Image: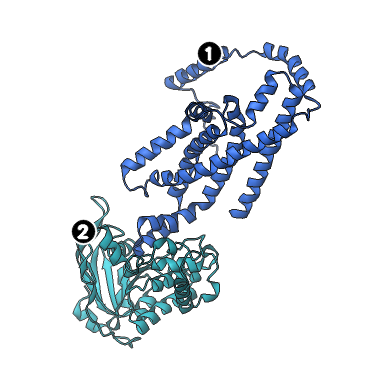
Chain colours: A cyan, B blue
Amino acid sequence: MLLDAERDAATPHAPARPAPALSSGVLEVAGLAKRFGADKPVFSDVSFAVGKGEAVALLGANGAGKSTLLRCCLRLIEPDAGSIKLFGRELVGASAAPLRELRARVGFVFQRHNLVPRLSALSNTIHGALGRSASAGLWSPRLWSQALAPDGLRAEALACLARVGLADIAARRADRLSGGQSQRVAVARALMQQAEIVFADEPAASLDPAAGAEVMALFADLNRREKLTFVYTTHNLAHALEFSDRVIALRAGRIEIDAPTQSLRADDLRGLYG
Amino acid sequence: MADRSVPALPPRFERPGLLAFVLWVAAGALFVSALRGTGFSATEFFHGIPNIVRIVGEMFPPSPDRLAKVGWALLETFQMALVGTAAGVALSLPLAILATRHLTPHPVFYHAARALIALFRTVPDLVWALIFVVAVGLGPFAGTLAIMIDKIGFCGRFFAEAMEEADRNPQEALRAIGAGRVSVIAAAVLPAALPSMVNTSLFSLEKATRSSVVLGLVGAGGIGIELQVSMELFRYAEASTIIIAIFALVIAVERFSAWLRRRMI
């Protein structure tokens, strides 16, 4: 953790965003540990909580375990020890059905967007509703492609694409989109999911600086206007300082910094990469 | 310039080790025994050339006497190939999913599906035709079933490989959304594997068209039986008509599948 004295010494820069009014914890992680093989610990004893409406930047050098931590929080990678509570419900040890139910409430935007390449932007957006199909009484085969989807869902997906500024390319195949457009379709998929929290794993890393900033601004806008909880990993210190309320930094498998963004400067964070 | 000593050139060929030498000798012996076992003889081949020339001479001009019957048999041959391939492709899909390591619900299903595919693929279609002729009687249905089984083996293997090679990232994205196994397969795996699967299916149709000609030789329907009768009755002009018809059908199917492949992939 950053020492209090160091934090006090740091000149707080002008707050770019108002501090959110936090309510109950959306994500609570306690004592989480993960190792790949006996001699490859990734992180251990990681604990933090994320409140509703919070934007949290997860920092750390390559191999610090940011992406693994984010994936563990959805059990896309199984943690070795610890507890993960999403919306107050324990994720570790949950069976397939409740796990799917919890995942359906969490959007995940990957570094390389992970769209289905041969399907249209509209079909990929409609996939966002797959997780809520059971609870919404939807027959999931109708969500496999926009051609099969009910009219209401097609319109909803188009509205999600419009929110990310891509309604005009709804019919275009995902493999014919630019990197920035693909990433925005991935955001539209999370919107279609009606996610309450979005995890984003270096969402701007595969994009050029302008497209990366555009995608980050989109997330920040959703976070501000719709109180969407947002946890993202990044190597870009400017993105961390500009788009988050709080920074959690990993170093050598432990949390080194967990502090409000307002209290941090870029210099405080550069040490993570030394 | 400083005098530099140049090392000796390495040998052109490495001296084989004892095991490699023994294996080479064994392989040579096996090939020689195979030549003897098959009665391979250049002399007999050259003695047979006049007969080949005579038969080819008798084949021309092709006889149009049984053109209508040949046409119907050709149509039946294509129908066998089409229905057998379509049924085989449809049935191979669920089997291929079970035979895909990361999609199968349990390792037992994986090994069982792989074993079944291996069985269907390794037993030749002619053997399946013999079995089905006994089971359902002479005629095109037996041939169609034989093609279907053969295609389940062929497509099952290649479909499974295409699904194993499909990009895992979109699958992970849908799992993260909370999509179930079937939805992940239908919405992420199949679209990714589709080009390869279409290619395999069209190649299967080409292969089935050629196979269905031969299946007639064991009474499993199609034009093969017509060819057999013509050859056995020394009606070579009629046989050449049939061979030309088969050639035209196979080329037409290959052209059609190449066109479809270009359009779909």
Q: Residues within 10 Å of mark 1 (few under 14, many from 20)?
A: few
Q: Secondary structure at mark 2?
A: loop
The disc placed on residue B137 is none
Instruction: Name the residue furthest right.
Output: B61
Callout 1 amino acid = Ser
Q: CA distance from mark 1 to mark 2?
A: 64 Å
Q: Residue at x 39, y 35 (%)?
A: B115
Q: Nearer the viewer, residue A183 or B23?
A: A183
Q: Is residue A114 left or right of residue B139?
A: left
Q: Which residue is mark 2?
A: A93
- The image quadrant where one finds the N terminus of chain A is bottom left
The location of residue B31, given as percent across then percent down, is: 54, 17
Residue B58 appears left or right of A108: right
Tag 1 subunit? B
Amino acid type assigned to the residue bearing label 2 in the image = Gly
Give the class, few, some or many, for how many residues have Cα within 10 Å of label 2's Cα (few <14, many ≥20): few
Q: Chain of mark 2?
A: A
Mark 1, secondary structure of its residue: helix
In the rendered image, the quadrant that contains the C terminus of chain A is: bottom left
For mark 1, what is the residue?
Answer: B33
The answer to which quarter of the image holds residue A20 is: bottom left
Whole-percent x, y for residue B44 in the image: 68, 11
Q: Residue at x 45, y 73 (%)?
A: A152
**As drawn, A195 above or below A63:** below
Seen in the picture, residue A187 relative to B196 is either above or below; the reply is below
